[in-house]
Amino acid sequence: MTLIFQRGGPGQKLSLLPPCDVPEIHLTQERAHAPRLPQVTENELMRHYKTLFDQMYGVNSGSYPLGSCTMKYNPKIDEEAAALPGFTQVHPTQDAHTVQGCLAVLHSLEKALCAVTGMDGVTLQPAAGAHGEFAGLLLIKAYHQSRGDGGRNRILIPDSAHGTNPASARMAGFEVVNIPSGPDGCVDLDALRAAAGPDTAGLMLTNPNTVGIFERNILDITRIVHDAGGLCYYDGANLNAVVGVVRPGDMGFDVCHLNLHKTFATPHGGGGPGSGPVGCKAALLDFLPGPQVAEEDGLYRFFTPSRSIGRMKQFYGNFTVAVKALAYLLTLGRERLPEAAENAVLNANYMMSRLAKTYDMAYNGPCMHEFVMTLEGLHKETGVSALDIAKGLLDHGIHPPTMYFPLIVHEALMIEPTETESKADLDAMCAALEALHAAAISEADTLRAAPHTTPIHRLDEVGAARNPILRYEFNGR
Amino acid sequence: MGSYVANTPAVRQELLDAVGADSIRALYRDVPEALLYPPLALDAEKSELEIRSHFTALAEKNKVFPTCLRGAGAYRHFIPAAVRAIVSREELLTAYTPYQAEVSQGLLQGIFEYQTMICELTGMEVSNASVYDGATAAAEAIHMCLDRKRTKIYVSAAAHPETIETIRTYCFGYDLALEVLPLRDGRTDLEALTAALGEDAACFYLQQPNYFGLVEDAQAVGATVHAAGAKFIMGVNPIACALLPTPGACGADIAVGDGQPLGLDLAFGGPYLGFMAATKKLMRQLPGRIVGQTQDTNGATGYVLTLTAREQHIRREKAGSNICSNQALCAFTAGAYLAAMGPEGLAQAARLSLSKAHYLAQKLAEAGLSRRDGGEFFHEFVTACDEDTAAAISAVLAEHGILGGLPVEGGLLWCVTELVSRDALDKTADLVKEVLP
């Protein structure tokens, strides 16, 4: 495909700004050379972007069963609400009385997320799940330090956890203790008991966990950590399985983060912006990042909690993402929210029960909103790997599931259909995977060179890392 | 369906039968009974019509000022119609991180183009695919500069207060000491800087133009920082980069900033865009996603996420940063904005902002409101007055649909962009004159 820099030519431009109506000013020192930005007409610009759009795959392209990412449908009314000029044209430093609508959005969403999570307070400031994890861990750190318990420097994390968990723990200054998972894919209680002690600051856990199973011993798990003096952090990435059905606060968690771009249907935007609100129980409210929104007699204002850990970023968080999530929550309400979770779980179980006839499942028993298949056996038998099956799916016009995660399963494919896929969509995904299994046996070589029908074929990722080319070079410079 | 669930109740029953479960509840058999189905403190569902009314009413409670004379980290610039058309596309909006490169070349190429443009803007050699905002970009940049011996962080007091606060929070996490270095006449005090930087200094963060709009002597600061063996981080305004000497030309090791002025709405503070660019030497220390060029099996040029061995999903607790999702759509928007504006349009936006800000400063001075600081400024400046006068000015301007300068210590911080006409600037000065004693 042609790069934008290879289009147009010197002197091409759009006619955008009027002439200067005041005396022109020049700085004493200005840059020597102008940046080499594209010089195109508006027609060339739009045609360029059209070629880019033609090679993208989104939820509106087809099924997107990317496990752990909750690629559910993005409602258009949410987009419309977020695009209202009353939201997009207001400056973040305007006096509170001129932005009561914005503050009402933030306050309403904070309250709704408290209701969903069973937490006592929520901050909407973190910009993504990982950012939320970092904030939540800082809450735990501040809490222990405030009690003279700063020696608690370890965070317990299951070996099945998403990579952001240990990375966030390190950013917050903690050491990571890996807790092995049992053969059932769940936290090994004995290992947890052995690891929990006076140096334990807390536990990070997703529930359902990263293999798509609900930790049935969750109340024991959180009790073990609490008995040792630690706090429990809930990674909300998998909330879609239980949203409106089970509350993290009731499971014994003290802090949690949510992913608005997963559970609450805001669009993923090619990799962001997301939003990672953090909720906490009463004991931690004073430490929340500021500012927060308070309401009194129908008037909203900002305030900073008395022992706040500070700011996670500038301003208040990804505000228009919050608008979209609030619109989604208000649309579903108290009855439809659990319905979304139930059908996410039902859809996943349907796919798993059908595919279990062909593929090996990593774990037995019902799954939650996602399930993990292991292709280790198939790989040994045919030489076809999880990657090959995934690439083969591209030839069926379906986005592959998550590959090679969690690390505790070999040749893993993690499938999360979400509730917004129809039975026909689910059947089509299953049929494609069944056909690929047959192809693995009868035409392994073809499959190992898949995809064949996409605009581009397998890319040399090793070469890309060994000899990084991270920008366009003009005139081969 | 009010929940966007695709299957009707009848079809759901079919699925249950196929699974062999009696009910949905049976699928939750691993959940302790006491935890299931708590009452939810939420309202009943709403139809789309009701949602539209609800949010329209909320948006109407916000005051949109026709004229904006305020920046302080959020800038109202001209956004071309073509850019809005481009970034509203569903293909882009509903995509996720391009893990499957073969079906994501459009997104990957768009980010590669963005990375190139950020390098051109900043004069640096490599750029990542974005982080959350300018403040977190500064915090991440600081982390890149640490090593075993050098762990002390220095930041200019003329950086945006919220950037300083964010860096402080990150330092709480990393257990690092942060020192904010004082100013002289609103700018970094070179003597204080030289005195402060010892053998354990990791880096110094300078904002350019600084929070008060002043142009710092970045080259001199960079030389001072390097003489002490520390790294030089510049936080820059991307519009100003069209005219000011680039961070690359000033010897910066890392250039960061907020790309919000590049085609993103004010949006009450977010989502914005953290850009990060560095020297080739620091390439592998950059956090977050990076897109690289490569070849496919047929030799065709293509793009992939690369240098992933830096990232959290590979290195886990050994990763430099935990970042996973970034601000991809915002980065794509910035790329589209820069492509639409081109070098001439961007320089024009910068020149107009610079010139109009100087015009306003002059008119305000004539009206009796003088600058607090001396020295060169870009498109923001502070006028001196007490709190009561500041409040009176703000109120009068607000009555006329003008969002005036931000109250700061000792006065008001003004900003002018290409959107504000000469007439509006004259009107502003006239209104201020009436208010002043």
Image (cartoon, rainbow, N blue to C red):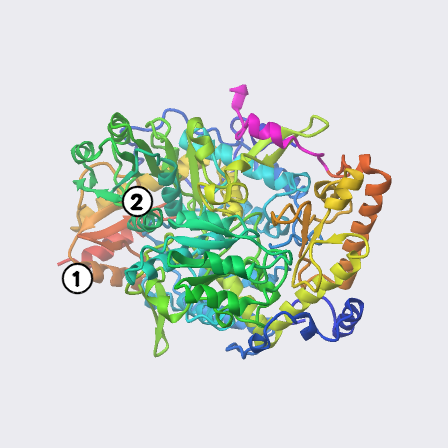
Give the number of the disc on residue B176: 2
Find residue A445 and report its horizontal and vertical position in percent: 81, 34
Choose between A117 and B108: the one closer to the eye.
Answer: A117
Kind of residue at disc 2: Leu
In reply to whether residue A461 is colored magenta, the answer given is yes
Observer able to see residue B33: yes
Residue A424: quadrant of the picture: bottom right
Answer whether residue B423 is magenta in the image. no
Q: Residue at x 30, y 39 (%)?
A: B209
Label 1: which secondary element? helix
| Residue stretch in magenta | A455-477
The residue at the far right in this view is A442
Tell me how far mark 1 sits from mark 2, CA to CA: 39 Å
At numbered mark 2, what does the secondary structure look like: helix, strand or loop?
Answer: loop
B192 vs B15: above or below: above
Quarter occupied by residue A69: bottom right
Q: Position of residue A232 (x, y in %)?
A: 45, 63
Q: Residue at 66% across / 70% down in the picture?
A: A342
Q: Residue at x 71, y 60 (%)?
A: A364
